[in-house]
Image (tube, rainbow, N blue to C red):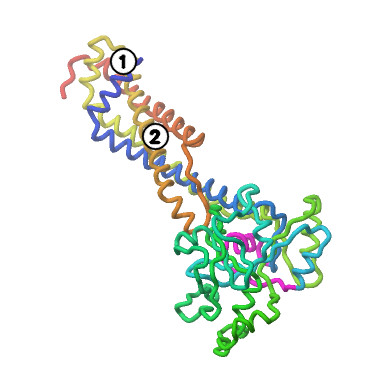
């Protein structure tokens, strides 16, 4: 058997030009299939690890997926706000252990700005229960302090005490939409989390109110520049509204009851969602597209396997004398059969292995860029069970496909003898 493997390997080397092209075709098809699968599973895992330990997210009525996306992943914008008295009412509930209000809407050089409270650094969890930690500095304790995520610090080169100016909305301070009359300074830098927190500038809720003094009409009032910082600090900076509320409960047994109470609130209309359920809805929405992509990728692998069959079949006429010589030197029909089956299996194995290496190399290169762009970590890992399963499946399918030309070659070698003329 080892002699047949050696002979099959030498035969492939003798036809290395066409064999390499076939291996590349199989590798690309396997890389496409695994790339789709790893992007799907990596995105799900990254989203699932973004928030944990928060039982409910409360916001204005909208789709549950939309509320999850803008409050946790900073994707999109809220359709309405929650008033401050309503927030206080929720925070005062007997079944609520803690609440963290957030206010979104402003930005800084392309990064979203989020107003919140000190409780955010104590209660927000990610990655199965990990708490936020500081790489440098401290939480904000002054009105114009800011805490920035790891990506913000890395991409902008910020360090503690670096000044920064926020922009109104998602515009640019250079276009006249900035709060340059209310500059902030970096108080702390968070350690990397692999979540949207890394791309967020955190300030206090009072700071969000302070920088919008003079913006009551939606545009900047020129007279607002005459209001000094000391005057701003003397104002009542209690926010009028918040974008969403993260809620932790004293007992998870009260989760459904609390959700129902908030959703049926008789006063201000509200929506309370369970993060895990909202994520499940998101995956249900994307499931059809995921299955379609995987099906297309599987068909591409089938095309790659057909290329193995085509390559061997087209070479049979050229190899009839080779097969006859093998028979004349003592090879039996099943030896000829196994030779071509082994050749097909080797091509499939090498193509699949190359495809696995290729997709992991691409993930290693693209993962940092995907995290930087979307704030979701896809993770860089060694080949796992899925890779081994694909390697085994492609190799097995190649062996089976190789049986087709192998049967033809076995019959021809018996009939041709040494009389073949090429």
- Of all residues, the one furthest to the right in this rendering is 94
- Of all residues, the one furthest to the bottom in this rendering is 223
Q: Which is nearer the eye, 109 or 313? A: 109
Q: Residue at x 58, y 87 (%)?
A: 224
Q: Quadrant of the C terminus?
A: top left
Residue 266 at x, y = what percent?
Answer: 81, 70
- Spatial separation of the CA atoms under disc 2 and disc 1: 23 Å
The magenta region covers: 62-84
Residue 225 at x, y = what percent?
Answer: 55, 86
As helix, strand or loop, the secondary structure at mark 1 comes to: helix
- Number of numbered tags placed on the structure image: 2
Which of the marked residues, 2 or 1, is nearer the chain's N terminus? 1
Q: Is residue 348 shown left or right of residue 221?
A: left
- Depicted 389 relative to depicted 248: above or below: above
Q: Which is nearer the eye, 61 or 198? A: 198
Q: Is residue 197 shown left or right of residue 12?
A: right
Residue 394 at x, y = what percent?
Answer: 43, 33
Please give the residue where the numbered disc 1 appears in the rendered image: 3
Mark 2–mark 1 CB contact (< 8 Å): no
Please give the residue where the numbered disc 2 appears in the rendered image: 353
Q: Nearer the viewer, mark 2 or mark 1?
A: 2
The answer to which image quadrant residue 101 occupies is bottom right
Q: Residue at x 37, y 42 (%)?
A: 28
Q: Residue at x 65, y 79 (%)?
A: 233
Residue 169 at x, y = what percent?
Answer: 55, 75
């Amino acid at each position: 058997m080892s002699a047949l493997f050696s002979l099959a390997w030498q035969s492939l080397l003798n036809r290395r030009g066409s064999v390499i092209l076939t291996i590349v075709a199989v590798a690309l098809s396997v890389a496409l299939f695994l790339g789709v699968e790893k992007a799907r599973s990596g995105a799900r895992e990254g989203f699932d690890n973004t928030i944990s330990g928060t039982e409910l997210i409360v916001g204005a009525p909208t789709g549950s997926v939309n509320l999850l996306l803008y409050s946790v992943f900073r994707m999109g914008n809220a359709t309405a706000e929650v008033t401050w008295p309503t927030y206080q009412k929720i925070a005062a509930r007997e079944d609520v252990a803690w609440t963290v209000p957030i206010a979104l809407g402003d930005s800084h050089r392309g990064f979203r700005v989020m107003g919140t409270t000190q409780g955010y650094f104590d209660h927000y969890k990610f990655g199965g229960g990990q708490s936020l930690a500081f790489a440098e500095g401290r939480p904000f304790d002054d009105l114009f302090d800011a805490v920035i995520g790891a990506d913000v610090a890395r991409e902008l080169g910020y360090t503690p005490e670096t000044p920064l100016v926020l922009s109104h909305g998602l515009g640019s301070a250079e276009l006249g939409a900035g709060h340059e009359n209310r500059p902030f300074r970096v108080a702390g830098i968070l350690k990397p989390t692999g979540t949207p927190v890394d791309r967020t500038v955190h300030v206090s809720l009072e700071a969000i109110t302070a920088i919008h003094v003079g913006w009551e009409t939606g545009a900047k009032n020129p007279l607002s520049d005459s209001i000094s910082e000391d005057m701003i600090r003397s104002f009542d900076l209690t926010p009028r509204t918040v974008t969403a509320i993260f809620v932790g409960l004293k007992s998870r047994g009260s989760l459904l009851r609390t959700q129902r109470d908030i959703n049926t609130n008789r006063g201000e209309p509200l929506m309370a969602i369970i993060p895990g359920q909202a994520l499940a809805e998101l995956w249900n929405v994307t499931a059809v597209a995921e299955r379609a992509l995987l099906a297309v990728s599987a068909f591409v692998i089938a095309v790659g396997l057909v290329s193995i069959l085509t390559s061997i079949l087209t070479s049979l006429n050229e190899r009839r004398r080779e097969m006859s010589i093998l028979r004349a030197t003592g090879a039996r029909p099943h030896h000829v059969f196994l030779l071509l089956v082994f050749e097909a299996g080797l091509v499939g194995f090498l193509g699949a292995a190359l495809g696995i290496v290729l997709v992991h190399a691409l993930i290693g290169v693209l993962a940092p860029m995907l995290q930087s762009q979307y704030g979701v970590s896809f993770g860089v890992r060694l080949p796992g069970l899925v890779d081994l399963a694909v390697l085994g499946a492609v190799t097995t399918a190649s062996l089976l496909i190789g049986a087709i030309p192998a049967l033809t070659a076995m019959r021809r070698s018996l009939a041709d003898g040494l009389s073949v003329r090429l």
